[in-house]
Image: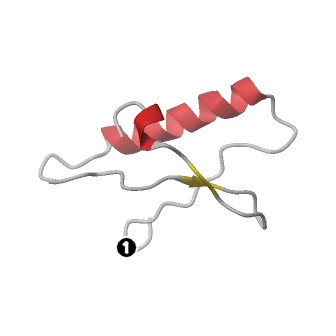
Amino acid sequence: VEKQGIIHSGIGKLSFKDEDLKTNFKALTDAIVKAKPSGAKGKYVRKITLTSSMGPGLKVDLGEVEGA
């Protein structure tokens, strides 16, 4: 985690099946939400962007992510 709270993490490779990527993404987001400190106030997850190493980012609708 960076100083500003930014998390960089891999969830798979291009060769992975769609379902495997979805499973990995859900596991990552679940772990982030679960790690929220009890004293944290306000919106904990403000934005999620998926990207390849050198590609453009794709914004994720937070309404589609459970607990975010």
**Badge 1 density bin: few <14, some 14–19, many ≥20, Cα 10 Å:** few
Q: Quadrant of residue 55?
A: bottom right
At x 56% / y 61%, what residue is drawn?
8
Q: Looking at the image, which is closer to me, 38 or 67?
A: 67
Q: Is residue 25 left or right of residue 54?
A: left
The residue identified by callout 1 is 4
Q: Is residue 6 left or right of residue 68?
A: right
Q: Residue furthest right?
A: 15
Image quadrant holding the C terminus, namely top left
At which x and y percent is residue 64?
47, 33
Image quadrant holding the N terminus, namely bottom left
At which x and y percent is residue 30?
42, 35
Q: Secondary structure at mark 1?
A: loop
Q: How is the image coloured?
A: secondary structure
Q: Looking at the image, which is closer to me, 58 or 12?
A: 58
At which x and y percent is residue 50?
63, 52
Type of amino acid at the residue the image marks with label 1: Gln
8 in relation to 35, above or below? below
Q: Looking at the image, which is closer to me, 68 or 29?
A: 68
Q: Quadrant of residue 3?
A: bottom left
At x 32% / y 44%, what residue is drawn?
35
At x 35% / y 51%, what residue is drawn?
45
Q: Residue furthest top?
A: 19
At x 12% / y 52%, what residue is drawn?
39
Count the labels in the image.
Answer: 1
Q: Looking at the image, which is closer to me, 59 or 6?
A: 59
